Amino acid sequence: MIYSNYNLKSLNSFGLDTYAKTFIFIDKENDLLDINDTSLSEKNIILGGGSNTVFVNDYFDGTIISIRNKGINIVQEGDDFVILDAFSGEVWNDVVSFCAKKGWWGIENLAAVFGNVGAVAVQNIGAYGAELRDCFMECLTYNPLKKEWKTYVNEDLNFGYRYSIFKNQKELEIIWKIRLRLSKTMKINNSYAAINNKIIEENLNISTPLDMVNLVTKIRNSKLPDPKVLGNCGSFFKNPIVSESHFELLKKKFSSIPSYEVENGVKLAAGWLIEQCGWKGKRVGNVGMHNKQALIMVNYGNAKGEEILNLAYEIEKSVKNKFNVELEKEVHIIL
């Protein structure tokens, strides 16, 4: 279905009251035929659940393609593994719950992450010691301009921290479905301190993936706001990575600075940096940083995209001044 001047407020988790010049709903494969030279514009955006998207202006003078195809299909199953396809319009957390209830391990630490399946490959979502790339096999895409289907395997996507090649698309490619390989053998991932500490503190018995889903969901809900109550996009900034020499200088000045060793340096906690700059719980007009998690920017009501960008700029500037660290936005900014 194609619409003109379509209101996007219910289709972005920040709850921004924005309109799109042209809006196309894609529910099934035949709907892809609606994407053509007539319906496309100079600016074209593929929208999933809108959970990582900030519309800067009140009007998007272009075309938005919303992918809503559904389905979770088992492709192959063995004694100790299962391979499944999940279509892009599925809610990611529904897929996690489905797999956990089946007893399949691999994505349980990624529970309660907002958004749809298609976006998880774009973003290489990660949480609590796990990333999508750990179990991602391939994805099927469609290029509406070339009328071409293409399969990308894990290595093709050049996965990195909150990154895949789809993050900066040069061509319009729709991720139609993704393929995952999960395990039937118990593989508890308690490498993340918050998970391991909770298991020890409460003497929890994690014996099924559903146990882990419930634990992760409980932890996330305790500190992350529900976007249906307070509009937000989850983590607004990436955790920055600095060189070891830079970190040593920071450690001398800020002894309690949390850090995690990674291949190309030291990863810092963006939320901690922002909190140290006094932004946690601070409100500026209609927007502010959440009082339980300084990494989450929230819409207190009727926020404009411009307000969000202005606050982000002030936070970036203060972190740069205090720590000489550059923050990078994790959200997708739509101009």
Image (cartoon, grey):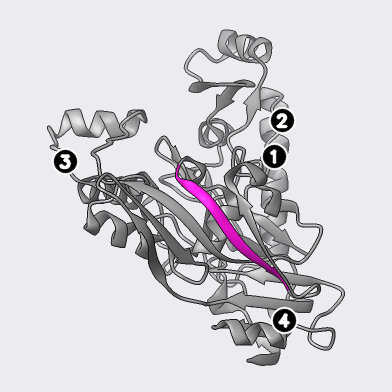
Q: Which residues are magenta?
A: 135-143
* Snapshot quadrant of residue 77: bottom left
Residue of label 3: 207
**Type of residue at label 1?**
Glu
Query: Whole-percent x and y of residue 140?
Result: 60, 63
Q: Residues within 10 Å of mark 2 (few under 14, many from 20)?
A: some
Is residue 42 depicted above or below 245 in this figure? below
The residue depicted at 63 percent of the width and 92 percent of the height is 1
Q: CA distance from mark 1 to mark 2?
A: 6 Å
Magenta stretch: helix, strand or loop mostly: strand
> Which disc is residue 316 wearing?
1
Out of 212 and 249, give the one closest to the viewer. Answer: 212
**Type of residue at label 3?**
Ser
Residue of label 2: 320
Badge 2 element = helix
Out of 250 and 92, give the one closest to the viewer. Answer: 92
Residue of label 4: 20
**Type of residue at label 4?**
Ala
